[in-house]
Image (cartoon, helix red, strand yellow):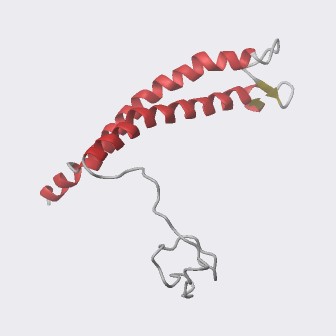
Amino acid sequence: MFRGFRNLLLRDDVTVVTVAMAVAMAFSNVVNAFTDDVISPFIAAAQGDVSGPGFGWQLVSGGGSATFLNLGGFISAIIYFVIFMAVVYFLIALPYRVVMARLGKTVFGDPPPTMNCPACLSDDLNPAATRCKHCGADIDRATA
């Protein structure tokens, strides 16, 4: 029983995902601080001389932060997401793809080619197929 559990934990893909998650979580704090402490003040300054918690509008006069439409926070979250995903791609996914290519495995590659069924218009058929797996129609090579 424990041997199977150990083998599961020591598989290459589980180990890589675990390390990637740890790195991603650690870097998440850095990116979050960057967007909150560096990007957000610039976004709030873009609004001008309006006093308030940031770039946005107060929906109800005297409503406080509960009714403040905070566009600056939303823009910061989008910037955070883009920066975070770029870091994950360039520091985790790209090196992983290079290492797996050296081992002869293709990861994050282009999807295999497909063809369309002229009868039901499904677009996920194997190019070597002679019948549609969805509707059963014969596939003529000249029209497919």
- Residue 143, image x, y percentages: 61, 79
Q: Front-most of 61 and 52?
A: 52
Work out whether 38 lies above or below 89.
above
Residue that protrudes farthest toward the front in the picture: 142
The residue shown at (42%, 52%) is: 109
Q: Front-most of 116 and 30?
A: 116
Residue that protrudes farthest toward the right in the picture: 61
Work out whether 104 lies above or below 123.
above
The residue shown at (50%, 81%) is: 133
The residue shown at (54%, 81%) is: 134
- Quarter of the rendering containing residue 140: bottom right
Residue 69 in the figure: left or right of residue 10: right
The residue shown at (85%, 30%) is: 60
- Residue 17, image x, y percentages: 33, 44
- Residue 37, image x, y percentages: 58, 16
- Quarter of the rendering containing residue 93: top left
Residue 103 in the figure: left or right of residue 90: left
- Quarter of the rendering containing residue 57: top right
- Residue 106, image x, y percentages: 35, 52
- Give the tally of numbered discs: 0
- The quarter of the picture where the C terminus appears is bottom right
Residue 120 in the figure: left or right of residue 93: right
Q: Front-most of 23 and 54?
A: 23
- The quarter of the picture where the N terminus appears is bottom left
Residue that protrudes farthest toward the top in the picture: 49
Work out whether 144 lies above or below 62.
below
Work out whether 143 lies above or below 51.
below
Q: Front-most of 124 and 56?
A: 124
